[in-house]
Image (cartoon, rainbow, N blue to C red):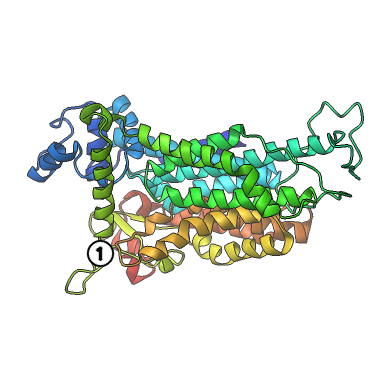
Amino acid sequence: MLLAVAAIAGGLRFWDLGYPTERVFDEVYYSKDACLYSGFSPKTCDISSSDEKYWVRERDEVGSWVHPPMGKWMIAAGEKIFGPTSFGWRFSAALFGTLTCVLVAAMALLLFRSVMWGFVAGLLLATESLSFVMSRVALLDVFLGFWVALGFYFLILDRRWIRRRSNLAASEPPADPEIQMVATPLSVAEEWVDPPEPPLGPEVPMVTAVPRQVPSPLWRPWRFAMGIAFGAAAATKWSGLYALAGAMLLTLFWERTRRKEAGQSHAVWRAVMQEALGVVVALVVIPVVVYLLSYVRYWASHGIHPADFWALQRAMEEFHTSLSRLKPGGKLTHPYESQPWTFFIMARPVNFYFEGQGAEILAIGNPAIFWGSIATVPYCAYSWWKRRDASAGLITVAVLALWLPWFMWTNRVQFFFYMVPVVPFMVLACVYTLRRLSDATKGEGRYSVSAIALISLSVGLFVYFWPILTGFPLTSFWWRRRIWFPGWF
């Protein structure tokens, strides 16, 4: 199933990847800086303007120094292999966009315990328009989306890892003879076998007569892997910190639940006290180390001077805070600026490439996924609250953690493609809802008519919009049929 998802997503993303041959939108910054990261000369990297040369002298980069280096290192890997060509600077975006589809299919497999629904999740993301477009241009957001998805995937694995050990601990005689458990211990034949993996669904607390201890090891390998992934996300774009905050919140929720299942009182306080050191090391120290390591090129050329490095970080922060969405006269600073409350309705997608009416690359979302999420994400939130469904909780927290923080910066320039890291979880929300609907109408593991209809609609809309996602030339008549609203022009 995962190989099939990889084949579909990769085939779509790598097909004619080098078109158009010129740089589109912010590729003029990231592809050139990645070229410098690859070791090519400024002339080879097409650094010719006086402004570009100034920033290379001042910051060793053309202009993308306002973002951390990780994403540019990833673009540079493609240019190192294939050269500073349009295919070379887009190769890594297509590769990691494909891997994100595989990751989402793997997450759905863990969340829903179904190969079929895992494939549906991978297919929906593979044919989601915004993810598709961003996987074919050398911008940072597709890499941010990959690291965020990988971090939440490791979070799921960490939960399964610790719950398995909690179940094993529950089957052993208590160390304190005064603590007695009601749960039946494993038989001799079963005690050396891992218990079945519980689905990440509604949590049913174990019945205990008195409180019992739960394992709280410092070494949790998937938690440390999660810290590396979220550190790489923050080292790609600072907005990766939003995902890290959401993961830490989920960690607290789930650790509290684990202690409540053990019958412990003051579960939140116990979770904080017993997990604080492990969380700080894995989700604070490790991400900081990864962030600092991403600046290896900076350290090599400037030396290790903390004050200078801190001054660079302050300059980056000042740049972002100064990007007002309105000019002094009241006009928009950027024609494709949009606000976070319009992201789900796709009021203002970004035009990356335009060659007259009929040939353009429009970074637009798939209407079936985006407009459908207006219903499916609240349904996930409801299921989390009503059914205590941990999979619905993960989807809800991920979407909100990656979307709501943008409301704090409504005075700054923002773009619709900031939703790229959110899209995988919007897809999971749709799959969660379709699965629940199918189970209610047809039985476990089978499609309902409505599920088949929505999946077909989503894939069909991708095919319909494909020409304006790839710059395929259309006549003016057929191009206008795909520009549904004035904000899409």
- When the figure is inspected, residue 91 is found, relative to residue 335, above or below; the finding is above
Q: Position of residue 41 (x, y in %)?
A: 16, 28
Judge by depth and name the residue closer to the eye, 234 or 447: 234
- Can residue 269 be seen here? The reply is yes
Tell me which residue sits at (23%, 26%) in the image.
39
10 displayed left or right of 120: left
Residue 247, relative to residue 223: is it above or below? Answer: below
Q: Tell me the quarter of the image containing the N terminus.
A: top right
Q: Quadrant of residue 397?
A: bottom right
**Which residue occupies the extreme left position in the image?**
50
Residue highlighted by disc 1: 324
Residue projecting furthest to the bottom? 330
Q: Is residue 25 left or right of residue 263?
A: left
What is the x, y in percent for residue 156? 62, 43
User: Badge 1: few (under 14), some or many (20 or more) residues near its Cα, within 10 Å?
Assistant: some
In the image, residue 263 sits, relative to residue 407, either above or below, namely above
Q: Is residue 23 visible?
A: no
Q: Residue at x 91, y 27 (%)?
A: 188
Place of residue 239 in the rendered image (x, y in percent of width and height, measured from the top left) = 40, 51
**Left-right relation of 286 to 162:** left
Q: Quadrant of residue 331?
A: bottom left
Given the image, on which type of amino acid does mark 1 rest?
A: Ser
Q: Secondary structure at mark 1?
A: loop
**The C terminus is located in which quarter?**
bottom left
Q: Indicate the quadrant where residue 73 lies.
A: top left
Residue drawn 81% across and 44% down? 212
Q: How many marks?
A: 1
Q: Nearer the viewer, residue 453 or 280?
A: 280
Q: Nearer the viewer, residue 267 or 7?
A: 267
